[in-house]
Amino acid sequence: MAGQTGFDLEINRILNTPVSLVWKAWIVKENLEEWWCPKPWRAEFTAFDPRPGGAFDTIMRGPDGEKHVYAGSFLEVAPMERIVFTGLFGENWRPLPDESGMGFAAIITMTAQGDQTRYSALVRHASAEGVKKHEEMGFHDGWGAAIDQLEALAASLS
């Protein structure tokens, strides 16, 4: 669904697991690699430093040898509440070229609701073209599947 600018994509869910476990699934690199890509794709984080300005680099590999490299950084990390990341800046705020044409900033919020978590992924793009490209790449299905995997992994953690 579009936001105020028309340049946003958003997914909101209630996850049947406490926010502490959703956070653990997000902030531990090995956990994140388990759910980040919709299966059968897999993710390898080559740099992961969850602090403002810290690196957030991954290689996503598809079942037929596809490879997508993503370099980015964390903009904000508020434990058990909010994670903001982007591919427009690399580690230590180094500007990166936007070769994809759909550069974005993702704002992930987690709010405790008893033993459940209200989870929101708001993805802000620079242009309508970037939004369209991200939608055509399967934003809702792909991010939705990854959130399903996040929920399943978080439920398995202790």
Image (cartoon, rainbow, N blue to C red):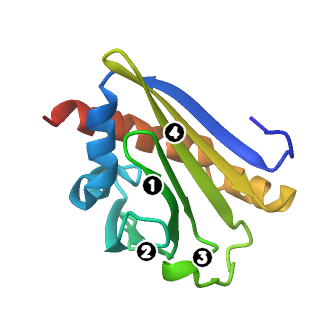
**Distance of label 2 from label 1 (alpha carbons):** 12 Å
Q: Are marks 4 and 3 in contact (CB under 8 Å)?
A: no
Residue 20 can be seen, yes or no: yes
**Residue at the spot of label 1:** 77
Disc nearer the start of the sequence (1/4): 1
Image height check: is 142 above or below 84?
above
**Distance of label 2 from label 3 (alpha carbons):** 9 Å
Question: Residue shown at 35%/63% (left/top)?
Answer: 63
Residue 84 locus on image (x, y percent): 54, 55
Q: Are marks 1 and 4 in contact (CB under 8 Å)?
A: no
Disc nearer the start of the sequence (2/1): 2
Question: Residue shown at 68%/56% (left/top)?
Answer: 134
**Residue at the spot of label 2:** 55
**Distance of label 2 from label 4 (alpha carbons):** 19 Å
Disc nearer the start of the sequence (2/3): 2
**Distance of label 1 from label 4 (alpha carbons):** 10 Å
**Residue at the spot of label 4:** 109
Q: Residues within 10 Å of mark 2 (few under 14, many from 20)?
A: many
